[in-house]
Amino acid sequence: MIRCENALDTSAIYDVHTQAFERENEAQLVDKIRDSDCYIPQLSLVAEVDNTVVGHILFSCIELVGKENLRVLGLAPLAVVPKFQRQGIGSALVQVGLETAETMGEALVVVLGHPQFYARFGFQPSLNYGIKSPFPVPADAFMVKLLTSYQEKYQGTVVYPPAFQEV
């Protein structure tokens, strides 16, 4: 079952990220975003198995700075407890998150991740659309997914909020 996170999920979400990444950086990132104006409650989703939170995905506001400063979505982080990985839970979280972002009228989603995984959802290298990473990364790993509200004005360099500096 996939649903929006609620106040009772905070520690379970922290545990999911800590287990999945074997460190606390991503869990702390979620907490910092949750406490910021970048947080979008409808786009913080958990996956449950037998009433236990086993996965989490967060889409939050980031900026695209070019001719205009535009608000777009960043997908980060995505985590599934190791014993539940490779069972489609992460894919389901991405799919539901993208569908929700679409219904909210969002224009595009940015992700830094594994090209083979994210390409299945329509993510493509960001440079194909004139969108640059703020740091040096492999070109195929910094990707965007265009949503229905996308317009060509969405070009420039991605700027992540301060919460991302410690990841």
Image (cartoon, helix red, strand yellow):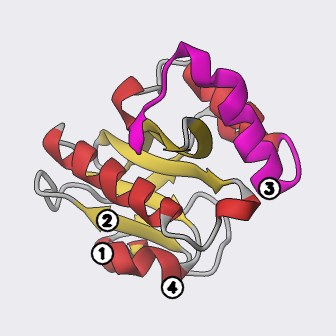
Q: Few, some or many C-alpha atoms within 10 Å of disc 1 (few <14, some 14-19, many ≥20)? A: few
Q: Which mark is residue 116?
A: 4
Residue in view at x 71 percent, y 54 percent: 81
Q: Which mark is residue 3?
A: none
SS for callout 3: helix
User: For mark 1, what is the residue?
Assistant: 122
Percent from the top left, x then y, of residue 145? 31, 65
Is the residue under label 2 in contact with that under label 4 (CB below 8 Å)?
Answer: no
Residue 32 percent across, percent down from the top left: 67, 25
Which callout, 3 or 1, points to the residue nearer the camera? 3
Distance (Cα) linking label 1 and label 2 = 6 Å
* Pointers 1 and 2 in contact (C-beta within 8 Å): yes
Q: Secondary structure at mark 1?
A: loop
Residue wearing tag 2: 145
Task: Give me the C-alpha separation between circle 4 and circle 3.
Answer: 19 Å
Q: Magenta residues?
A: 1-24
What amino acid is found at the position of numbered circle 3 in the picture? Phe
In the image, what residue occupies the spot 31% across and 40% down? 70
Q: Closer to the N terminus: mark 1 or mark 4? A: 4
